[in-house]
Amino acid sequence: MPSLKKLVLPLTLLLFTLILASCGQPDNTAASTPTTPAATNQPTLAPEASPAAVTEAAATRKYTDYKKREVEIPADPQKIVYVGSNPGDLLALGIKPAGASLSVIGTQVAYPDLLEGIEDIGYPFSAEKILALSPDLIIFDDWDETGIEALSKIAPTVVVGLDGTFPTEERVRQLADLFGRTEAADRWFNDYKTKVASVKKQLNLTEGDTATSLLVLGSELYIMGGKGLNETLYGQLGFKPAEGVQKLVDAGERFVTISDEVLPQYIGKHMFLLTDTSSKTAARQSALMDSGLWKAIPAVKEGRVYTFDSKYNFDDPITLDRLLDEIAGIFKGKQ
């Protein structure tokens, strides 16, 4: 689940996009899987069909973006730069940007294999690096609106969001409309829904099974609300929020920082533990797991704790698809 406000608050990248993701976001390259379009090695792909507003002779067209700005953009952009937390949104549509904000998220996403060939423009972005790429279109989805004006001087810049909490499908379909790739989006989401149904069947959950996502990051513990990994658990697979988590969901809270003492109040029948490999996180996790409080939690005692890399807390399409594979694999091993 993971926002690029991270230089100020480094933790939010993992917590938000996944939104924070707003929201899990694919692995297989077979035609039956949602990630097929992302397997391309081309910098960008031409739209499947020219938008209705484009005439055959037109080289540009008008597009009204998220901020209600009317921007003149190329009818068939060939070199795209993406500024934001969810490059996986573009990759799922078969669009590989020439440059993207990878400084923070490049090592934190679930699809590093798909980032090959994409230039890192830095975060905050480097105008010089972007200028060197000679983009003909810039896609902006960052919280710092002051960057829009500077980018607009380099190339047509379309604001698709401000690092907000839009659901994954809403974000991706907006991009699909922009690039004339609605059919690609339809295929992806249809394939994803089919895969969700298959994984859900494999889980064989009991009615009312509750789950909690616990994120250990550095020295802190976070309970996820309705975002990040929980968008998949609650929104797709049929788990129910534990009682304490339900309060966060009802209040629209993305996450809450907690102490060890109150942890049992949030834990459901199943616990999904999100962590990373940093020494600080490892030390915090070890101390928690060695405690009597942890060992007394029913989900721990009964072997219903499932550990995931925190990269699965993003919610772009690529991550969402690959997360299904991870969950299916872990539950298969428990059977």
Image (cartoon, grey):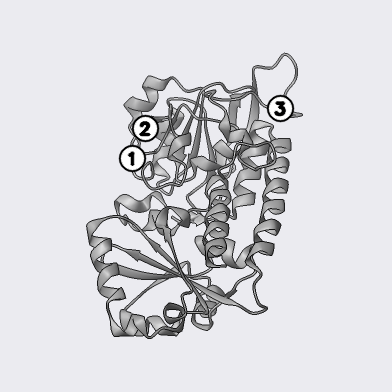
Q: Mark 2 is on which residue type?
A: Asp
From the viewer's perspective, tell me whether residue 326 is left or right of residue 209.
left
Mark 2 is surrounded, within 10 Å at the Cα level, by few (under 14), some (14 to 19) or many (20 or more) other residues, namely many
**Residue 23 drawn at (x, y percent):** 54, 55
**Residue to which mark 2 is pinned:** 120
**Residue 255 drawn at (x, y percent):** 44, 69
User: In this rendering, is residue 162 above or below 76?
Assistant: below
Circle 2 SS class? strand
**Residue to which mark 3 is pinned:** 48
Circle 1 SS class? loop
**Residue to which mark 1 is pinned:** 103
The Cα–Cα distance between marks 1 and 2, rounded to whole angstroms, is 6 Å
Residue situated in front as seen by the camera: 182 or 267: 267
Check if mark 1's residue and mark 2's residue have beta carbons within 8 Å. Answer: yes
Q: Mark 3 is on which residue type?
A: Glu
Viewer can see residue 24: no
